[in-house]
């Protein structure tokens, strides 16, 4: 059963990485490049991903059990992030200004562009519903601890801003979708179909964009940074195994467990690169780490998903 489930998960991950290959080839052939992907990223960030989250709330039938499971998903994803940052905290000493990049890459997974598409592919609307709780947790912790991590050793000192924490696409879309879910609201057929069309763009665009980023990474030097291997080991293997033990210990099972394991198993977040650029860190190093972790996750994510089904 383990290997059967691993094969199913591997097939779904392979589909996603075929889309990554499309982006890679498009960049190399000058059809669609990294700069275009970056300019298009706002469409994905501000419109398409929120549509996926809102649609997941509309597709779920409210009951006390489902609502409680959403709360459990939020706590589980928050615990994953917090344990990740605790694991990374004492590590990478002596690496200077690179240390925040390494630590951020261990702590924060690719929730919006990997976990959501993978949950959608494997688990459907219920998986996206649970994963959206992780998106909220990610935004809350990333825009507080994450910003502090990237700025504490540098020249940029960013004050805490509640507005930035609340007014971001992940949190806003949940603030829209959650009341609709609690009140049992359903959209009329025509706007629902339009929402479905927009949301369906999330998986292919997110993966194609990732392909363009990987295409612009120096693959020859990708495996020369030893600390990048440690980041990948911690993010893709150690942290998911720790969280599997925690989730099992508190009695989480079924689809919720699989969704939480997908969220815990994702490679380092694309925000590693974006935050590095914003706060004056090494963006080349950040890109290499994200690319390496993304490539290696082809092998590790299916194993962690299969483990969650035991």
Image: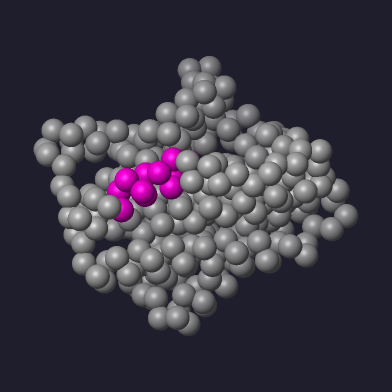
Magenta stretch, overall SS: helix
Question: Is 139 rendered above or below residue 306?
Answer: above
**Left of 182 or right of it: where is 7?**
right
Q: How is the image coloured?
A: one colour
Residue range in magenta is: 168-178
Residue 132 at x, y percent in the picture:
39, 53
**Left of 182 or right of it: where is 166?**
right
**39 or 117, which lies in front?**
39
Q: Quadrant of the N terminus?
A: bottom left
Residue 170 visible in the shown view:
yes
Residue at 72% x, 37% y is: 279
Residue at 76% x, 53% y is: 227
Residue at 61% x, 67% y is: 83
**Left of 258 or right of it: where is 222?**
right
Question: Is 170 inside the magenta-drawn segment?
Answer: yes
Residue 290 visible in the shown view:
no
Residue 100 at x, y percent in the picture:
74, 50
Residue 121 at x, y percent in the picture:
33, 50
Q: Quadrant of the C terminus?
A: bottom left
**34 or 142, which lies in front?**
142
Question: Is 6 inside the magenta-drawn segment?
Answer: no
**Left of 283 or right of it: where is 202?**
left
Residue at 44% x, 45% y is: 170
Residue that sits furthest to the right in the current view: 94
Residue that sits furthest to the top in the current view: 30
Residue 116 at x, y percent in the picture:
40, 49
């Amino acid at each position: 059963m383990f290997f059967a489930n691993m094969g199913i998960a591997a097939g779904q991950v392979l589909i996603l990485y075929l889309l990554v290959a499309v982006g890679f080839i498009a960049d190399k052939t000058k059809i669609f490049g990294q700069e275009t992907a970056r300019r298009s990223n706002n469409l994905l960030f501000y419109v398409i991903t929120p549509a996926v989250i809102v649609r997941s709330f509309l597709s779920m039938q409210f009951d006390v059990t489902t609502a409680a499971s959403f709360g459990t998903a939020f706590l589980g994803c928050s615990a994953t992030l917090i344990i990740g940052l605790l694991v990374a905290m004492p590590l990478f000493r002596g690496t200077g200004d690179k240390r925040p990049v390494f630590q951020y890459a261990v702590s924060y997974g690719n929730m919006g562009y990997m976990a959501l598409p993978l949950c959608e592919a494997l688990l459907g609307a219920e998986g996206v519903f649970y994963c959206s709780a992780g998106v909220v947790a990610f935004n809350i912790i990333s825009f507080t601890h994450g910003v502090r991590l990237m700025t504490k050793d540098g020249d940029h000192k960013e004050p805490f801003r509640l507005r930035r924490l609340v007014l971001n696409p992940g949190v806003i879309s949940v603030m829209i979708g959650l009341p609709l879910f609690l009140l049992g609201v359903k959209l009329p057929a025509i706007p629902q179909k339009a929402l479905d069309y927009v949301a369906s763009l999330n998986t292919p665009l997110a993966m194609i964009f990732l392909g363009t980023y990987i295409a612009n990474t120096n693959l020859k030097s990708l495996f020369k940074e030893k600390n990048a291997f440690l980041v990948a080991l911690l993010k893709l293997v150690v942290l998911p195994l720790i969280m599997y033990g925690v989730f099992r210990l508190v009695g989480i099972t079924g689809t919720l467990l699989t969704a939480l394991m997908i969220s815990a198993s994702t490679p380092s977040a694309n925000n590693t690169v974006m935050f590095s650029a914003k706060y004056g860190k090494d963006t080349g190093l950040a890109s290499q780490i994200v690319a390496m972790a993304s490539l290696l996750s082809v092998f590790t994510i299916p194993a962690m998903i299969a483990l969650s089904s035991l």
